[in-house]
Amino acid sequence: MEAARAIIIADGAAAVSTTKVAKQVGIAQSNIYIYFKNKDELLISVFQHEQARVKAFF
């Protein structure tokens, strides 16, 4: 999720792909699908994680 977050910050959510995330982390792309059904689920998970971090400040 941190790799996806970094891509979103650098290039926007549209630039996120499972291929890019896998390369940045140094794993096979298929390993991402162990944790996330698809790219949308990954993006939703990143969003929810960041949302929880923001709520923790308030």
Image (cartoon, helix red, strand yellow):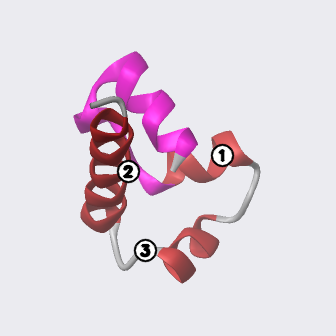
Task: Read off the magenta span.
Answer: 2-18
Give the number of callouts.
Answer: 3
In the image, 17 versus 47, the foreground residue is 47
User: Which numbered disc, 3 or 1, marks the residue that appears first in the sequence?
Assistant: 1
Q: Amino acid at mark 1?
A: Lys
Where residue 29 appears, as percent x and y from the top left, is 59, 65
Q: Which residue is label 1 attached to?
A: 23
Within-10-Å neighbours for mark 1: few <14, some 14–19, many 20+? few
Q: Residue at x 59, y 74 (%)?
A: 30
Secondary structure character of the magenta stretch overall: helix
Secondary element under disc 3, as helix, strand or loop, is loop
Q: Which label number is shown at residue 36?
A: 3
From what the image shows, is residue 21 above or below residue 14? Answer: below
Q: Which label number is shown at residue 53?
A: none
Q: Amino acid at mark 3?
A: Phe
Q: Which residue is label 2 attached to?
A: 49
In the image, 39 versus 45, the foreground residue is 45
Q: Residue at x 37, y 60 (%)?
A: 42
User: How far apart are labels 1 and 2 at the CA level?
Assistant: 22 Å
Residue placed furthest toward the right: 26
Where residue 38 appears, as percent x and y from the top left, is 33, 71
From what the image shows, is residue 12 above or below residue 25? Answer: above
